[in-house]
Image (tube, rainbow, N blue to C red):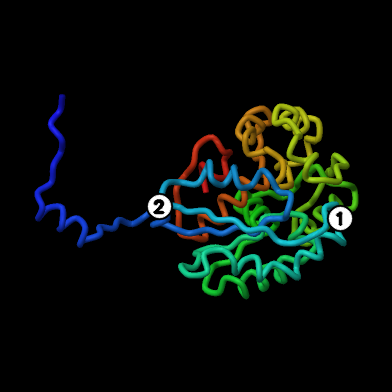
Amino acid sequence: MNKPDDLTAAARQAVLENVQFDDGRNARARIGFVLIPNEQTIEEDMIRHMPPGVGVYFSRATMPREISTESLAQLRGSLAETAARILPDDGLDVICFGCTSGTVAVGEDASCAELAKGAPGAKTSTLAGAVRKALTAMGARSITLGSPYVAELNDNVAAYLTGAGFNVVACHGMGLDYDTQMIRVAPDYLIDYARAIDTPEADTILLSCGALRSIDVVDEIEQRLGKPVICSNQAMLWDCLRQAGIDDRLPGLGRLLREH
């Protein structure tokens, strides 16, 4: 039987009187995400793929259940308050609004302004803005857009991309109304879906929406199609990390995180 690891009285007292600290789990960066109420994909994607030393924290804004331009626009009223609930004592390095169509409905500049009210001092990001920056980083010019959205929301995202200077050569939405449907779109289906919507005129494929599990298969889709593929959560991960000063190259998540 092993001898008990006994401390002397003096050693025990020294331990109790001198609490020792290290840098904690978020020594490199603290990133906060404002999500919509029924979102069920982004949290796991961000936690799974963040590099060591980067802490990720979440809160949820208020909106009706159905996903529409009108319901998404209502998110503006709660973005600041929701952002303010995330690490109010320690503060954040980056705060991100994690909804592509929500960013478009509220407006990218308006979304960032509301986030800044709630998390002063943090750099601001939005999912649509991250996609825009990712497409630019990849040198995209002509894009095929695929999404789970109904036609109205798909058209809104296409108009946002056109306004940002991209040529949307093809556009397809799955016609889904609720996040509870979008989160169940199978990753294997997304591979076939990307192949089906691809056109020779497009130099880049965009799979829009944080609810889709596109990040699981983005690397395989790129290999199948032989062209860059951007998906929402991949772009958001990349933008938040780079804004936080984290330059790690992450394998298995497409060219964006491997090369930029």
Q: Can you give x and y, in whole percent of width and height, for residue 149 in the image?
A: 83, 46
Q: Give left or right: position of 54 versus 231.
A: left
Quadrant of the rendering where the N terminus is positioned: top left
User: Can you tell which quarter of the image residue 45 is in?
Assistant: top right
Q: Which mark is residue 25?
A: 2
- Taking the spot 71% from the left edge, 27% from the top edge, the residue there is 188
- Taking the spot 9% from the left edge, 55% from the top edge, the residue there is 10
In front: 1, or 244?
1
Please tell me whether mark 2 or mark 1 is closer to you in this view.
2
In front: 254, or 240?
240
Q: Can you give x and y, in whole percent of width and height, for residue 241 in the image?
A: 51, 54
Q: Amino acid at mark 1?
A: Ser
Q: Amino acid at mark 2?
A: Arg
The answer to the question of whether label 2 and label 1 lie on touching residues, with beta carbons closer than 8 A, is no
Q: Can you give x and y, in whole percent of width and height, for residue 186 in the image?
A: 73, 30
Element on which disc 2 rests? loop
Q: Which mark is residue 142?
A: none
Above or below for 89 versus 260 = below
- Taking the spot 62% from the left edge, 66% from the top edge, the residue there is 83
Q: Give left or right: position of 19 versus 223.
A: left
Element on which disc 1 rests? loop
Q: Which residue is mark 1?
A: 68
Q: Give left or right: position of 7 versus 66.
A: left
Mark 2 neighbour class, 10 Å CA radius: few under 14, some 14 to 19, many 20 or more? few
